[in-house]
Image (spheres, grey):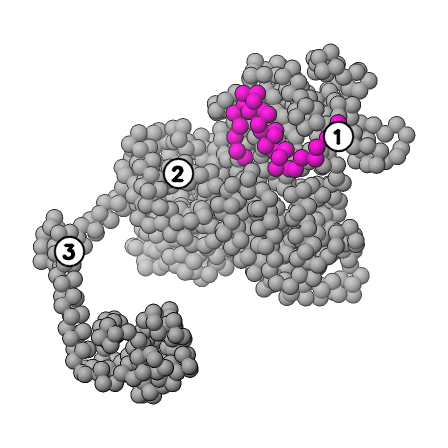
Amino acid sequence: MKMKKYGLNELRKMYLDFFKSKDHFVRGSYSLVPHNDNSLLLINAGMAPLKPYFTGQEIPPKRRMATCQKCIRTGDIENIGKTARHGTFFEMLGNFSFGDYFKTEAIHWSWEFLTEVVGLEPDRLYPSVYLDDDEAFDIWNKEIGISKDRIFKFGKEDNFWEHGAGPCGPCSEIYYDRGEKYGCGKPGCTVGCDCDRFIEIWNNVFTQFENDGKGNYTTLKNKNIDTGMGLERLATVVQDVDSIFDVDTIKALRDKVCEITGKEYKKEYKWDVSIRIITDHIRSATFMISDGIMPSNEGRGYVLRRLIRRAARHGRLLGVKGQFLAKLSETVIESSKDGYPELEEKKSMIFKVLTEEENKFDKTIDTGLSILADMEEEMKAKNEKTLSGENAFKLYDTYGFPLDLTQEILEEKGFDVDEDGFKKAMEVQRETARKARKTTNYMGADETVYESLDTSLSTQFVGYDKLIEDSVITALTTEKEVVQALADGDKGTIVVEQTPFYATMGGQVGDKGIIKTNEGTFVVVDTIKLHGTMVGHVGYVSEGMIQVGDKVTLKVDSANRNAIAKNHSATHLLQKALKLVLGNHVEQAGSYVDAERLRFDFTHFQAMTPEEIEKVEALVNEQIENGLDVVTEEMSLEDAKKTGAMALFGEKYGDKVRVVSMGDYSIELCGGTHVSNTSTISYFKIISESGISAGVRRIEALTGTGLMKHYADVEKKLHEAAKVAKTEPNNLVKRIETLNEEIKALSSENEKLKAKMANASVGDVMSQVVEVNGVKLLATKVADVDMNGLRNLGDQLKDKMGGGVVVLVSTTGDKANVIVMADDDAISKGAHAGNMIKEIAKLVGGGGGGRPNMAQAGGKNPAGVDEAVAKAKEILEAQIG
């Protein structure tokens, strides 16, 4: 029987339906943005989002699950396009067991699906097992009926899955023989050969051991199944095509690329490379944006930017003029929306992000390419083959060229790039930016004053547990220079050996307070990070003199610190609440916490609804009321990841990190200061929610004392408003309603008076009615009537004359208003108010338009009113002549 060539979307559904019939909980794909997994920038395997279920940190919705997970891998991005087998985006089919079924069921079901559901020929399928896994070998041989000579045994490198310490186990893969046409032609070509004939299409991972990290294995009490099968690879086999770029849905996209570029596939190798790069990268970009990832210069946003800009450049190489990525994204969405409905839901945002990013790149690429060409000429003149890291960084920082784009362009011409130099230049720029931020504070000082300090100086922070500490001054500066002493009234910065003052970092502002010596007092208005661990206490001498070497007592303003801590802890609760209400796409995009308020920036596609804001507030206040203990632990980064602690992607963390837990509700990596119990926060209130950039929203909120001040201010304004309205606060709403009714009545009376005056100003105009080819026309001017008055007057006159066309022109100050009305009979004979007014409005220095029955316009040339009235007859004659 000839195998049916199922489409990719059909195969996805067939797989999920099959495992649903085997009592699996079928779940839609998780986001490409990892949830509580700081080991990954992007989801790169089907099992990655399920790690908490495998480790036992979370209870799965069911002990049997099946998914089709979208994945991104960019590790070998330099090979994308050059070969037809590499891709950054792929879909991974998977069935999973968390301590439920094991090898027997997994092997039987994999065979059943491939042979009975998909219809692959059994004699073209070859299983492999780990060489010591006799159990799996026997299932294949004795139960499935595969002869021993067709079951391949491989060692640890190929058929044993483990990742350092933790759960691990043997694998059993299934290979498909695609036939001699895909083979290498060498004698004895079989499973394990590097050619494309025998292709692995299924991988059963039997997680049955625990590795202690030292090579000692113990059997797990609950054994797991982790199955992975690439959907595109399966489709390649089923459809009997050369590569993933020939699979139905991807081919449709590839064909669209060819249509837009005007290039034919498989005609010229360099065209094929560009066509494949564009095809692959637009798939990745479309799915990444749908999961809330925004282009940026860091983290996963940088991955997205690289993909978009690489695709845009290859479009240019193929001769595309103007923007084209959003058009291609339409094809991606159309072919994948059945499996991923979020693509259709978010397509407008996807198109906008792609268009904006392509726009940005278009504005810089020509200049950047020109600069790069100059750099190439310079290298040739010096007989060099490597672009300096400094120049590569200049292209990145000034012209938005991702490093790999520069590398790719240069590689085509035989050059390479100093990557280490690029990274050093990047770090210098970041350090400079950090310094600039730190020093543009209270003193507005130039950062060079701090660069003059001895870099060997350091400060130990002891302020997590205490707010008062004795220490010694190691350095002093004014706003301009390093000094030995500061006198009464001098502004400056103090550096000490130990401090309880928290320096501005991670969105939390620095502490305020007092530093005292035997001879003087220094008021600290800000605390900033300097070189290394050095901390600067910025402020002024309020009395006496301060000198280097003085013994000091540092005292943090406890009320200010406590208010900051309340807002910082509330920020952690807010982030978790936003994820629960809006979805796991929410990621922190910035924050600011001081004693007055908190500000939290996060990725989200649209403005929050009042209901969503209310839900978030309620969740945060619920956790405040629950009185969760806030526990801070210091541990290794690896151990912190195991707790599921949230971290900011792109942030650098040392070997030791602080994990801040608020009950089981929130766990985050954080170096800031916090309350000891959430009940201390008292209450949380969102005062604003707004957009600050594409895909990024901002919330501002208040807690504790800041909230009480806010309510006091609102109460004060309420009393002031009540006083102006001549009532009590409790009656203010009723008073406003009464005033609105009075305004409405007065407005109605005013309109009647205006209409009466307008009628009076017109006088007896019926004598001015003329006939134009059987249509009555009244064209006249009236004095000082606004547009609303003209409309009312026009209706009355049209009724009075029994239908036809009315043209009214009025002047109010230095402006002219025009209105044209026509009844159905006039319209049927050719009259069109909208077209008439376009001609008339020109005469009063304006423009306008409208429907056939009514149109209005304004102008800035009242002197043309008489001509406009006179012209009306001529215009109508032209329409109905």
Residue found at the far front of this picture? 774
What distance separates the C-alpha of mark 2 from that of mark 3? 36 Å
Q: From this viewpoint, is residue 299 visible? A: no
Residue interval drawn in magenta:
1-29
Amino acid marked by disc 2: Val
Q: Which residue is mark 3?
A: 736
The quarter of the displayed image where residue 242 is located:
top right
**Sequence-wise first label, 2 or 3:** 2
Asked if disc 1 and disc 2 are in contact, CB closer than 8 Å, the reply is no
**Residue at x-position 40% and y-position 56%:** 441
Residue 140 in picture, x, y percent from top left = 72, 16
- Residue sitting at x 34%, y 80%: 774
Q: Is residue 634 placed above or below 568 in the rendered structure?
A: above
Q: Is residue 168 left or right of residue 773?
A: right
Choose mark 1 or mark 2, whichever is in front. Answer: 1
* Quadrant of image for the N terminus: top right
Q: Total marks drawn?
A: 3
Q: CA distance from mark 1 to mark 2?
A: 50 Å
Instruction: Identify the element where label 3 is drawn.
Output: helix
Between residue 738 and residue 156, name the one nearer to us.
738
Residue type, label 1:
Lys
Residue at label 1?
2
Q: Which mark is residue 581?
A: 2
Q: Nearer the viewer, residue 878 or 141?
A: 878
Is the residue marked by circle 3 packed among few (<14), some (14-19), or many (20+) residues within 10 Å? some
